[in-house]
Image (cartoon, rainbow, N blue to C red):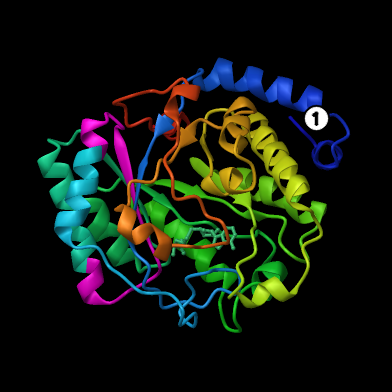
Amino acid sequence: MLTKPQILSYLQGDNDAELFELSAQVRQAEVGSESYLRGLIEISNRCAKDCLYCGIRCSNAAVERYTLGLDDVLCSAQYALESNYGSVVIQAGERTDDYFVTFIEQCVRKIKTFSNGKLGVTLSLGEQTAEVYQRWFAAGAHRYLLRVESSNPKLYSRIHPTGYSWSKRVDALKMLRNSGYQVGTGVMIGLPFQTLDDLANDLIFFKKIDIDMCGMGPYIEHEAAPLTQYKSLYTNEQRIQMTLRMIALLRILMPRINIASTTALHALDPKGREKGVAVGANVLMPNITPQINRPNYQLYAGKPMNDIDLSAFDVGYGEWGDSRHFGDRD
Ligand code: SAH
C-alpha cells in the first residue's frame, strides 16, 4: 500500500518510469488490457450553476443554449449501438426542474427498450435529490459520474461561487451509492491554488469513499470563466504529466475500479488519451453528440470536437464494461 509520502514523491515526478511501469502491470493483472467505451451524449448545455472555471456556466451569455430532442438522443444512442460501443453517458449542465427530470427519465427508458437492454446507461447530470437519483436508476441508468472537483473544501469554495457546498456534493455521492449506482467521481488537475498535497489528498479521498469509477483531467482555462484570471501553478505539459501520475497512482491504489482517459487530456496533447490508457486508464468516452451542437458544449478552450481514432486501442466492444470493483462488493 502506498503511503502519503510515497504518493507525494511520485507526484513530484521523482520516478515516473517506475510508477508508470508498476501501474501498467497492475492494470494488466487486475482489469486486463481492454478499454471500454461510453458514447458521450451532451444532452443539454443549459445550466443553473455558475462554476467559476466552466465555459457553459449560466452567466456566460455568449453561449447559444440547446437541449436535444428525444429523437436526437435516440439517434446518437442508435449510433452507439450500431458501433458496438456497449454503453452511453448522458451529460448536461445542471438542472433540477420537473420537466428536465422527466425528460431524462424518458430518455433512459427509451434507450434501454430500443436497445433491448444492450446499452448500459451512465448519467452525469450533477447534484439532484435522492428521489430523482432513484427515479433515474429505476428507469435503467446504473452508473453515475459526479466529480467532487477537489477533495479540499477550501479549494472547492475558491473555484465556485459563494454558497456552493462541498459537503452537499459529497452527500450527493453518498445518495448515489445508496440508490444502487456504480459511483464515479473525479477532480480537475492543475487548478489555480491547488497544491501537490491537495492532489495526494484527492487520491486518499477516492479510496476513503470507495469509488467505483473515476474521471480526472487537466484543468483548462476558458476565456469567459472568472477563474481564468488566476494563474495555475502548472504549465499545460505539467498538467498532462500530473494527470498521468494521478491516473497511475489511482490504478495502484484502487486496482479494480474503472478510470477514464478524458477528453481534456486529448485537448492538451493529441496523444493524451493514449498516454492515459498506457498508464492505467481503461475507459474512453467518444463524443457522439450531434455535430451541430458540439461547438456549444465548450467546457474549456480547445475542447476537441472530432472523434477518437479507436484503432489505437484494445477496445472491449459491445460490453458494458462495469467496474470490477463494484462487482467485488456483492
Ligand atoms: N453538470 C454536471 C456535468 C459537468 S461537466 C456535473 O455537475 O457533474 C463535466 C466536468 O467537466 C465537470 O465535472 C468538470 O470537472 C469538467 N470541467 C468543467 N470546466 C472545466 C475546465 N475549465 N477545465 C477542465 N475541466 C472542466
Residue 139 seen in the current view: no
Q: Nearer the viewer, residue 191 or 68?
A: 68
- Residue 83 on the magenta span: yes
Residue 232 lies, in percent from the top left, at 77, 62
Considering only vertical position in the picture, is 204 above or below 128? above
- Residue 160 on the magenta span: no
Looking at the rendered structure, the kind of residue marked 1 is Asp
Residue 103 lies, in percent from the top left, at 19, 65
Q: Is residue 167 left or right of residue 181?
A: right
Q: Nearer the viewer, residue 239 or 311?
A: 311
Which region shows up in magenta? 80-101
Residue positioned 64% across, 42% down in the render? 269
Q: Nearer the viewer, residue 289 or 322?
A: 289
Quadrant of residue 270 in the image? top right
Residue positioned 76% across, 56% down in the render? 198
Residue 267 lies, in percent from the top left, at 58, 48
Considering only vertical position in the picture, is 174 above or below 313? below
Residue 259 seen in the current view: yes
Considering only vertical position in the picture, is 74 above or below 83? below
Quadrant location of the N terminus in the rendered image: top right
Q: Is residue 316 left or right of residue 171?
A: left
